Structures are given as C-alpha cells and as structure tokens.
Amino acid sequence: MKGVIKFGKRGKLSPRYIDLFEILRTIGGVAYDLSLRLDLSAIHPVFHVSMLCHYIPDESHVILWESVQLDEQLSFVEETDSILAREVRRLHSRVILVVKVQWQHRPVDEATWEVEFVMCSSYLQLFVDSVDLLPFPEITIDSLKVSPSPLQPPLTVVSPSSLQCEPGYLIPNYPVGGNGGESGFRYLIDILYTRVYDMAHESPLQGAPKLLNRLGVNVWLKREDLQPWKSVKRLGATVVLVGDVYDEAELYAKKRAEEEGRTFIPPFDHPDVIAGQGTIGMQINSQLKDKIHAIFVPVGGGGLTAGIAACMKRVAPDIKIIGVEPSDANAMAMSLHYGQRVMLDQVGKFADAVAVKVVGEETFRLCKELIDGVVLVSRDAICAAIKDVFEEKRSILEPAGALALAGAEAYCKYYGLKDKNVVAITSGANLNFDRLRLISEFADVGRKREAALAIFMAEELGSFKPSVNSSLRHLICNFAYYMSGRSNIHNELLCRFTFPEKAGALWKFLDAFSAHWNISLIHYRAQGQIGANVFVGIQLPEYAFDEFQGRAERLGYEYVVESINDAFKLIMH
C-alpha cells in the first residue's frame, strides 16, 4: 500500500497503512476482504484493488510508526489573509454567495473561491475586518419579507393567565435547534455589514460582583441603556399618543401612513430592524471571551431576540438564547406553546416597552427555530432586578430594561446554575419619577424580603399590644387593624379592576353598572402610568351575575373576580 505521510489540502494529515496483510476473499473482482493486525480490528477490512497496488519506489520514504516521535510544539496551521472579492453564483436550483480568499502558509500562497457561509462560520473575524472594503452583491431571498399587520386575522385569542409557570422555567419545555437556514445566514451577513454604528455606539459589557456573591453565577450586564438618545421632538417630529398598548398605536400609525402617503417604520418585524438589533450579539461575542452559558433578552415583539439569536446560533450555537417576558405580557411564550402566533386578549402594562399583544411574523419564525425558550417573571421580580442594577451600578432602569436580568436570576435559581457566565441585556432607562415609589415598594416583595400576614386576635380589651409585641415586632413595616372588620353581607361579589390612568376612568366605571346594585366597599390605589388597582365589593343578586359580566366586558377594563380567593374570603367573610 501507499506509504507516505503527507499534508493534504488545507492542512489535513493523510497517513497510510504499510504492513503485511492477508487476502481472505475476493469481492466482486475489484475488492478484497483482508485480515489485518488485531490492533486495527476497528477498521473496515474491505479495500478496493486500487488501494492495494501502489508501488513505493524508495523505501527510505517509509517511516515505521514505532520510530515516530511527536513534538507537540510543531504544527501546520493554515491561515487566511484577506477576502479579495465577493460574488453571487447561480446554481441549477439555488443561489449561493462565494468569496475569494487569500491563504497563507501553503507551499505557494494562493487564493481560492469558497462558499461564504462556510468561511464565515470558521473565520468570522476575517469578515469583520473586511466590512468596509467590499461591496455586498444584490441578492433577494424570498423568506425575507416585511410581514403584514400582526392584528390581521385569523389569530387565536388567548389569556395571559392561561400559561403560567414557576419563575425561571423554560417555555417550551422541549429542545429547539437550527440556525435559520439560508435566510439565517443572510441575517448574519446583514449583521456584519450593517451601518447601525453610524448612529449607535458599542455599549459596555459589565460584570455584577454583588450578584455573583449572591447567586454564585457570573452575571454580565450588556448596558444598552447607555446608548445615546435624543428626543424626537428636538428632531422636529410630532408625538401622537394613541391607545394603551403598542398594537393600538401600530394600527393607527399604519392607517395614517396609508391615508397620508407616509412610510411606516416597523419597530421589530422587519429584516433590517432584526439585523440591526442582532449587532448586540456580535458585540457580546467579541467582548466576552470566556464560555457563555446563556444570553437573556427582553421580549416584546421579538426583534431583539430574533436578531441576537440569528447571530449567535451561527457563530456560537452552544450558547443558549433565552427570552424573558412579564407573566401578564407573554405573547411569545404563548405563541411558542401553541406552535403559532396567537393574540393576547389583554396585556399587562407595567413593562410598557414590551406590552405587545402579538409578536411579529418574521420574528416568530426565527425565534421558533433559534431560541432555547422563554422565561416568565412577575412584576415584583422586575422591581427587584431594578434595585439590583441600582445597587451594582447606581443606574435606574425602566421595567422593560431590567426584564432580562429578572429572567436570568429566576433561571439560575430554578435550575441551580453555578459558576457559569450569563449575559442579561439591559435595554432601556426611560423611567418616569412617579413610578419609583411603586418600584421601591415592590422590590422587597420581589426579593422575598417582605410578606403580608393576616393575624386574628381575640376581640377583648388589651389583645392588640401582645400581638404587636410578638417575635415579629422588629420586622413589621406596615399594618392595618380592623375591629370587627369582616363582612356578613349576603351575595357580595369581590372584584379587582385595573383602571387606565386617565381622566374620567372612575366615573366611567361607576356609570357602567346598574344603580340598583349596592357598592359595599371600594379601595383605589393609583400606580402612575400603568393604571390604578381598584378593589370593589358589589352586593349582587344571583340572577344578576350574567348581567354584571356583560357590563364588565363592555366596560373594557381588566378585572378578576376575587370572591373565591382564599385570602379575601378569610379577611372579608
């Protein structure tokens, strides 16, 4: 047999076996079944005749294996030098992108045409260095298209409360995989060549030592909240506030664009927007050289998540991409659960920047294939994450900006993650001052440092002081005392409504119900821009319950019947 140890194309070693062998039988006249040494028993023993007939003219070229000495410091490394050109080549059934690559460390330095996505996967930095040197050829891929309005029917309408899991649990609970196919590679190329840095800056990736001490996990904050910004009013734009959630504003904007001949710029469901947001993934890949376990991304319409996933699943497929949503604004989790886009019947507004009823069509297509799941977190957990960032960096994030960190903390606790690197995208700090009071109040609840207790005591003289002077006396921060506070009202319906924070909301509520129904209690708590929580008791005959439901639905305010809530039943009745 041929007995030369040589270097093959692109540095691959090609050793050949030289030793005695016995031909056991002929197979079809052109192949032989051989008997090899016992230490080669794992090798398939059938060889073509052409592999057995090579003559070695010079026995000095043969190196016995026993005499070979390995020097680990010696190696052959083939390196790329630069990209010289880029072309589109049309095959019989598809179009491919190719690049002309200049190689080093070959016997003769040469340039060869290679498939671009193969080279990009192995030599990503080469493409980053060549961004400004070469034009990108025009090519159209059908799967990259602007989606229609996410409010177009038919979409299944679901309630956010119908899918609730423990904090940190991944939805869906089955593995996903893929790299986006050909269009996924095109996204990677678009991310590499995007001009987003003409306006945006590369934000820092900062460690969080206090979280490391508390969680045992290296948490890195990708500080997108530090991006420079300018008021659109200063740039000459007119701000028009429409609706309570994004979907209502989008519908109005599209209508105006059509009527007035203007251009509608989608905030997330467009390939260019997705590619621009995917540059964050490329930054993380270059900023953190240690192995990353997961990147946590806030999810609204899905553009940021899809962009980062399209990038990272091409260049570092082992890194998990995990979306994070509020438990009452879980459109992406619900869509992944059902396997198709769905519409939420209502959406929580605390993290208003991600308060979206329907995720984008293109963003969902990418997320369904690329991301590893979605984590749901509560309002209190978001507030706790805002406090965590303040204690780490003395910066105050908006609720949506702290959403990813809340998800990262919940995930690490649920799965017992230790000694890993996780990255959380801190996406914004657009916070009004009137919300700080609520965030401060809810943060300790989110950290599980505060709880509400109901204590019953004897209705007799002197019973109150011993109750306060208990083992809890140093922990009490707020209390309310009711003497004979429980109600014996018959047919009392207890409901919790969420009012929009705008003039006339309370009057509209009172005007919606029958004057024959007795309001037995009402407790109002303003919460800034996210609305107001109103706890209401209504004395309602049993036959009027259907009428109440109809009036409440027409009112349009979010509400929950709390009559069956054990805590309320204990206190009120």
Image: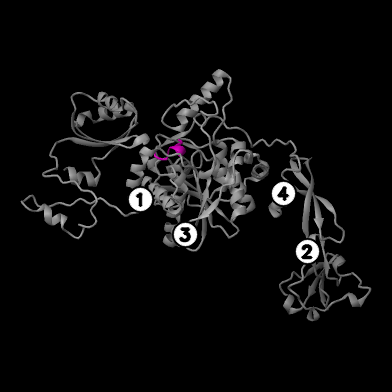
Q: Residues within 10 Å of mark 2 (few under 14, many from 20)?
A: few
Asked whether the beta carbons under mark 2 and mark 4 sit within 8 Å of each other, the answer is: no
Question: Gap in Å between the C-alphas at discs 2 and 4?
Answer: 26 Å
Residue placed most toward the observer, 343 or 357: 357
Q: Classify mark 4: helix, strand or loop.
A: helix
**Label 2 vs label 4, nearer the camera:** 4
- Disc on res. 129: 4
Q: Kindly report the distance in space between the C-alpha atoms of the residues bearing marks 3 and 2.
A: 44 Å
Tell me which residue sits at (42%, 57%) in the image.
414
Question: Tag 4 or tag 3, which sits nearer the N-term?
Answer: 4
Foreground tag (4 vs 1): 4
Q: Which residue is mark 1?
A: 446
Residue type at mark 2 is Lys
Q: Amino acid at mark 3?
A: Pro
Of all residues, the one furthest to the top in this rendering is 259
Q: Earlier in the sequence, mark 2 or mark 4?
A: 2
What segment is highlighted magenta in the picture?
350-356
Q: Is residue 52 left or right of residue 394?
A: right
Q: Report the number of discs.
A: 4
In the image, what residue type sits under mark 4? Asp
Mark 4 near mark 1, Cβ–Cβ under 8 Å? no
Which corner quadrant of the image does residue 467 belong to?
A: bottom left
Which residue is denoted by mark 3 in the rendering?
Answer: 209
